[in-house]
Image (spheres, helix red, strand yellow):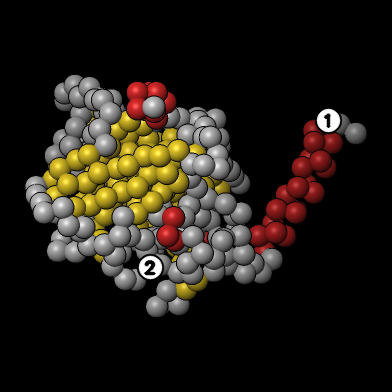
Amino acid sequence: MRPFSKSILLIIPFVVVYFIARSLPVEPCDFLHEETYNSEGVLDYCGPGDSGFVDLTIRKWPLTISMRPLGEVKINEPCDFEINLKEFDGSPLAADEVALSHTEKIHLLAVDPSLDDYQHLHPVPDSIFDGVWRFTITPRHFGQYRVFLDLIPIRSPRRVLLSDTFEVSGGEPIIANKTTSLSHIIGNRKFELEVRKSESDGDEFIFKFKARDSNRRPLTLRPVMGAHAHMVAFDWERKGFAHLHPLETEGVVGPVSESTSKDLEFSFNSSRISSCRLWTQVLLEDDEFETFVPFSFDLKTYFNDTN
């Protein structure tokens, strides 16, 4: 038997198994921690997420992403982008094959080289072509932006994280400021981050997020994407990220619906990175739009200096 024929015979069983698996009736969310549905009867998942940093330069998923601007990319001007998502066999990843996660199909996290411009967006699927998604972004700095996608294919046993880039030309990128900063003031509001080591794991840290008004009274946080806050930690090289949710969501079935004035705690595993820019996303009671709060620190240096 010729080598080519032998190769074909070896491949055929794997192809058959793949298409049989795709044709089997799968209960949505079998692989998720909680199976919940929103008011429209659509599958929706909300949970604490992964506390660890994921390096996308060494960890891969069997999906591919290609992204292109639909116009000229200019600083401080909105630009439409098109994303094509395909599975390993080249078939498009359609919208009905992606589960809702924290009320959205896809979470898109975009950051400039300095990590000073962080934007959390949600691409929408094309109404005609499967696998095609679109979003609009207004870049605030020059340089090469890195884009991360966070999604859950319904037939996958886990989250899928993908990455791509786009360039904002016409000027020099700003230099990243890596100075430790655990407090941030926006108007008459002050946001603070308290950091402590976990008692159970040497690589785990607990972040306590505090939001206060000018009189030091706790601010009220409305639900945003099914949680009272979202945190994203980026390494300075932008190899990956950690997407964190409040520990209060552990054991909670479905998105939170009530506001809170409590301080929120998050778990973060520092085994892969310790120095990072951390962005916290909240929706304050009196605001129409969400507030993004930056913090910066090196956990090892910080604890060496404070202990």
Query: What's the amino acid at mark 1?
Result: Pro
Give the class, few, some or many, for how many residues have Cα within 10 Å of label 2's Cα (few <14, many ≥20): some
Quadrant where the C terminus is found in the figure? top left
- Asked if residue 102 can be seen in this view, the reply is yes
Q: Position of residue 124 (x, y in %)?
A: 35, 58
The residue under label 2 is: 256
Comparing 102 with 48, the one in front is 48
Asked if 263 appears above or below 241 in the picture, the reply is below
On the image, the x and y values in percent for residue 181 come to: 25, 32
Q: Could you say which disc has been placed on residue 184 in the image?
A: none
| Residue at the (61%, 60%) spot, across then down | 31
**Of pointers 1 and 2, the one earlier in the residue sequence:** 1
Q: Nearer the viewer, residue 87 or 272?
A: 272
Q: Residue 107 appears at what percent x and percent y?
A: 38, 51
- Quarter placement of the N terminus: top right
Residue picked out by circle 1: 3
